[in-house]
Image (spheres, rainbow, N blue to C red):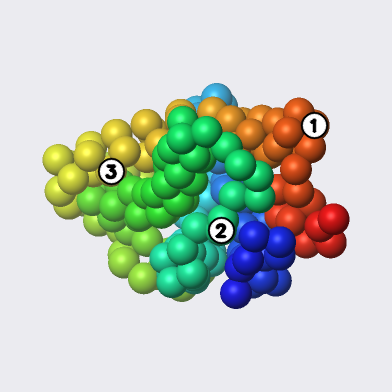
Amino acid sequence: MDTRDKLSPTTIYLHWLVAVLMILMTALGLFMEDLDSQFLFDSHTTFGWIVLIVILPRVIWRMKNGWPDAVGNYSEIEHLSSKVMHWVLILATLLMPLSGILLSVANGHGLAFYSLELIPENPDPNTVGEVLPLAPGLGEFGSLIHGFVGEILPFAVALHVVGALKHHLIDKDETLRRMLGMKTR
């Protein structure tokens, strides 16, 4: 269980695992977008499944245990901004893989986990190598959500890191040490 002085190993492990996976997936997605390349699409969707499988226990763990108590005494606005940021990050980590699955399936690309085809592509019988959307409106919605969250996620992560550094360097409290699993003073 998480306390003011110590976070559980489960909390720490899930936090850092999801953080690293989300940063890698976001970087891969932005790289794919910059190159306008689809050759990494299968890897991106497979890793998206893996990320979702890891995110679900993190979200369940966080909802079950609640948010950790603040290490220091902070103003109401600091508490509010912390809660908002944590909710943005939790929701973004859920919305990215879910919207990615939605846009892939609805746009006719199917869904695979490595080479295991979970939902088949919807091939266009008139054009080799092309697919037909199954639900274009849902595909556009999934794409919109995936793109929007993909744009705000790097900023949310950066603000989260800045907040952690503020706690460590300016407030000189134990927040970062606690998140790193170190002993607090």
Measured in 3D between alpha carbons, the distance from the residue under mark 3 to the one under mark 2, in whole angstroms, is: 32 Å
Residue 24 on image: x %, y %: 64, 45
Nearer to us in this view, 162 or 68: 68
Q: How many marks?
A: 3
Q: Secondary structure at mark 3?
A: helix
Tell me, for residue 142, which label it has, or none: 3
Which of the image's four quarters has the N terminus?
bottom right
Among the 4 quarters of the image, the one containing residue 122: bottom left
Residue 185 on image: x %, y %: 85, 55
User: Crowdedness of circle 1 by 10 Å Cα count: few (<14), some, many (20+)?
Assistant: few
Q: Which residue is mark 1?
A: 169
Tell me, for residue 68, which label it has, or none: 2
Nearer to us in this view, 30 or 70: 70
Instruction: Name above or below for residue 185 compared with residue 103.
Output: below
* First reached walking from the N terminus: tag 3 or tag 2: 2
User: Crowdedness of circle 3 by 10 Å Cα count: few (<14), some, many (20+)?
Assistant: many
Q: Residue at x 14, y 40 (%)?
A: 137
**CB-based contact (under 8 Å), mark 3 and mark 1:** no
Residue 19 on image: x %, y %: 62, 50
* First reached walking from the N terminus: tag 2 or tag 1: 2
Residue 171 on image: x %, y %: 73, 33
Label 3 or label 1, whichever lies nearer to me, is 1
